[in-house]
Image: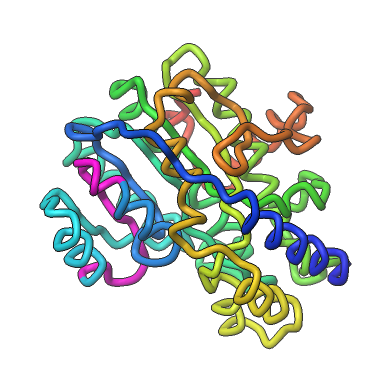
Amino acid sequence: MLCFIIFCIFFIGILSKVTNAWCCSKVCLVGKTAIITGGNSGIGYQIALSLASRGCKVIIADKDDGSRSKHKIMEETNNKNIFVKKMDLASLNSVRKFAEYIKETQPKIDILINNAGIGSTALKFTEDGLQRTMQINYLGHFLLTYLLLDVMKKSAPSRIIFTNSIGCFFTLLKLEDLDPRENYPNPYKIYLKSKLFLAVAAKHFASKLRDSNVTVNSFHPGAARSGIFLKAVNDEISLYPIVLGLLTIPFGKSTEEAAQTAIHLACDKKVEDVTGKFFLECRQFLMPFQTTNTEFCKEVFEYSKKLVKLKPEEYTI
């Protein structure tokens, strides 16, 4: 399996360098507000920088101090409407506090970019008792998106965007994969499965919001030199993240290149009515097979609501 994934990363890396697309939209975003998770570094930072350069009000949600990133963006773009707020996706309580802050302080949210993620395959668990990679990559973003739905529906037309991975095409899901335990048979697949769950939930969000003028799409940024896998070495000394991380150094995109599809989805008029799709290089791509199973998508959605401890009075869709 690892050899196959290495081959895929190598192939996709070469392909992405040859076919790398750039967002050509010239749309001004003055008057718009965007939230970007993980906007303190990597792809998220480049997305924040680009949206800010178009006049957008940008709120960076990150577990790390974003003061330096904030000032760099303000200095480069002359946009003073850049804000940072601490949010740790590994804590459902932190996500809830951030969502409450947004609802109390922001009259509208036009763009929500769920970008933060980790590449760890370690079977570590959060304070909520959930597997860490699954919570940070998927369940934390699921909760954040759900809690902000009312604001985004009132702000419509608005856009929800999930940073995914083409790796989600190389695994299959069972419902119990959402809550893997210590005896999980293949922890190396947890990252891929977290991304496929993200695609499944995004598809169901899109279906539920189809008449609300809120679009929901996922995208693969390309094999980027963002350090996501090498950072995972802090969690585990494992061949898997080390090899994948090292492969992105010679074959990966720059983070600016990798941010282009997210920028395209955030502002291009060509996709203002497109929802429930998967994008690659600023173009629609195939959907992962299991996203076409409506009943499975519904089961994942309902189980996710249970795992993130949504209250019945919070159910909006």
Front in this rendered view, residue 184 or 121 = 121
Residue furthest to the bottom in view is 237
Residue positioned 53% across, 59% down in the render: 136
Q: Is residue 243 left or right of residue 62?
A: right
Quadrant of res 191: bottom right
Residue positioned 59% across, 43% down in the render: 281
Looking at the image, residue 263 lies above or below residue 228? above
Front in this rendered view, residue 201 or 22 = 22
Residue 142 appears in the picture as rendered: no
Residue positioned 59% across, 34% down in the render: 283
Q: Is residue 2 left or right of residue 166?
A: right
Residue furthest to the top in view is 211
Residue range corresponding to the magenta coloring: 51-67
Q: Position of residue 61 (x, y in %)?
A: 33, 56
Q: Where is residue 126 in the image (x, y as percent from the top left)?
A: 54, 68
Residue 37 appears in the picture as rendered: yes
